[in-house]
């Protein structure tokens, strides 16, 4: 028995369909207690503020977020007994608002994007003494992924070499923290970022307007360690939505646009690695959904050849969080 909900942080690493001669696996972050990867930095940032003496019982937290960080913070604030105000662009999905509301957070919606939400959170911090956690700058954000996401992945690959880590970029916390730890273990691992085609600041230097939620903040986040990146892939919203529908219908995994974008980019990287290594005709078995639940005998999975390149990616949250966008209609 866990002594509290916050001890349930963590997610499985699950193999998904991959190009011939490669293996692609995704962290299913919807399994975290608040349903996304952002539960990790939410808990880490609150505990870092407590440790520094910046956050005490009776304080009110404020944070600008496009959603999942707000949900993670609202959950942690509820579990630990803090008040919280979330400042969010009005364009983000109503599911996110309803969930934060359910956890008891106060919401303030702003016109515009995350930059406008940041300005308003700065005002609330200055005028009302709220404690802002600043996910775009707070080192506890990448540190959470260094300590948890990456450590879980290292255990879950059971001794295999990871050849590439591919992830969307919002604050950059996930790719920087996870990437830094994976590179310590595998010096040759490729670290590849993903950003929206229409808001490809890292690839083009120009910001734009896009329909993704959580990736593509429209500026280069201070928490992004660009030195770690070997490349950046761009993905369009239509391709991502089509891939999310396919993943749900053909593989039984329900995710939103940015997870599907991370998967499309991962497959490009996997295809290239398989071509470079000439593993196209090597037997690299795909997902196996035989299950041992009703049998006495464990499933005897087909072994994966050591030559098969392994690409790990992140599925940020559940597709249930995006129903109102109509992407599954
Ligand atoms: C839903 C969602 N959350 C978060 C992120 C990014 O995480 P981070 O802020 O750690 O860069 C992404 C990136 O694709 C995302 O799609």
Image (cartoon, helix red, strand yellow):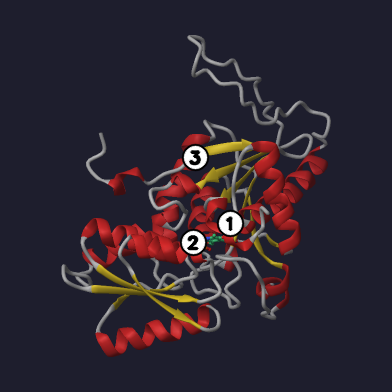
Q: Of 257 and 220, which appears nearest the observer?
A: 257
Q: Considering only order in the chain, which callout, 3 or 2, is on the residue closer to the N terminus?
A: 2
| Position of residue 309 in the picture relative to residue 104 (left or right) | right
The residue to which callout 3 is attached is: 154
Can you name the residue that lies furthest to the top here?
296
Residue 266 showing in the rendered view: no
Q: Which mark is residue 173?
A: none
The residue under the point 35% across, 60% down is 102
Q: Classify residue 198 by image quadrant.
A: bottom right
Answer few, some or many: residues within 10 Å of disc 2's Cα (few below 14, many 20 plus, some between 14 and 19). Answer: some
User: Is residue 232 shown above or below 183?
Assistant: below
2 and 3 marks in contact (CB < 8 Å):
no
Q: Position of residue 1 (x, y in %)?
A: 25, 33
Q: Classify residue 103 by image quadrant.
A: bottom left
User: Is residue 146 shown above or below 1?
Assistant: below
| Cβ of mark 2 under 8 A from ligand 1 | no
Q: Of 89 and 115, which appears nearest the observer?
A: 89
3 and 1 marks in contact (CB < 8 Å):
no
Q: Position of residue 223 (x, y in %)?
A: 48, 69
In 3D space, how far apart are the residues under numbered discs 2 and 1 (Cα atoms)? Answer: 8 Å
Mark 1 lies on a secondary structure that is helix
The residue to which callout 1 is attached is: 323
Q: Classify residue 124 by image quadrant.
A: bottom left
Mark 2 lies on a secondary structure that is helix
In 3D space, how far apart are the residues under numbered discs 3 and 1 (Cα atoms)? Answer: 33 Å
The residue to which callout 2 is attached is: 95
Eye-nearest disc, 3 or 1: 1
The residue under the point 74% across, 53% down is 242
In 3D space, how far apart are the residues under numbered discs 2 and 3 (Cα atoms)? Answer: 33 Å
């Amino acid at each position: 028995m866990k002594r509290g909900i916050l001890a349930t942080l963590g997610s499985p690493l699950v193999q998904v369909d991959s190009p011939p001669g490669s293996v692609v696996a995704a962290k299913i972050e919807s399994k975290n207690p608040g349903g996304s990867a952002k539960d990790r930095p939410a808990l880490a940032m609150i505990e870092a503020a407590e440790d520094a003496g910046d956050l005490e019982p009776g304080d009110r937290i404020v944070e600008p977020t496009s959603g999942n960080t707000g949900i993670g913070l609202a959950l942690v604030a509820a579990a630990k007994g803090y008040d919280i105000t979330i400042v969010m662009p009005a364009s983000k999905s109503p599911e996110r608002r309803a969930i934060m509301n359910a956890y008891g957070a106060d919401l303030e919606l702003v016109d515009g994007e995350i930059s406008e939400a940041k300005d308003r959170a700065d005002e609330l911090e200055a005028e009302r003494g709220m404690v802002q956690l600043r996910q775009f700058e707070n080192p506890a954000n990448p540190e959470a992924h260094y300590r948890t996401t990456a450590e879980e992945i290292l255990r879950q690959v059971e001794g295999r070499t990871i050849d590439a880590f591919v992830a969307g970029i919002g604050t950059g916390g996930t790719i920087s923290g996870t990437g830094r730890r994976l590179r310590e273990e595998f010096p040759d691992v490729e670290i590849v970022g993903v950003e929206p085609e229409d808001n490809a600041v890292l690839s083009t230097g120009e910001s734009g307007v896009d329909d993704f939620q959580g990736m593509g903040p429209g500026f280069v986040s201070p928490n992004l360690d660009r030195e770690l990146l070997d490349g950046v892939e761009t993905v369009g919203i239509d391709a991502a939505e089509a891939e999310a529908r396919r993943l749900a219908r053909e593989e039984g995994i329900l995710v939103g646009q940015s997870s599907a974008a991370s998967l499309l980019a991962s497959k490009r990287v996997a295809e290239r690695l398989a071509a470079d290594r000439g593993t196209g005709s090597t037997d690299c078995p795909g997902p196996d959904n035989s299950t041992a639940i009703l049998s006495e005998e464990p499933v005897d999975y087909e072994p994966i050849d050591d030559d098969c390149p392994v690409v790990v990616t992140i599925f940020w949250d559940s597709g249930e969080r995006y129903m109102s966008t109509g992407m599954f209609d």
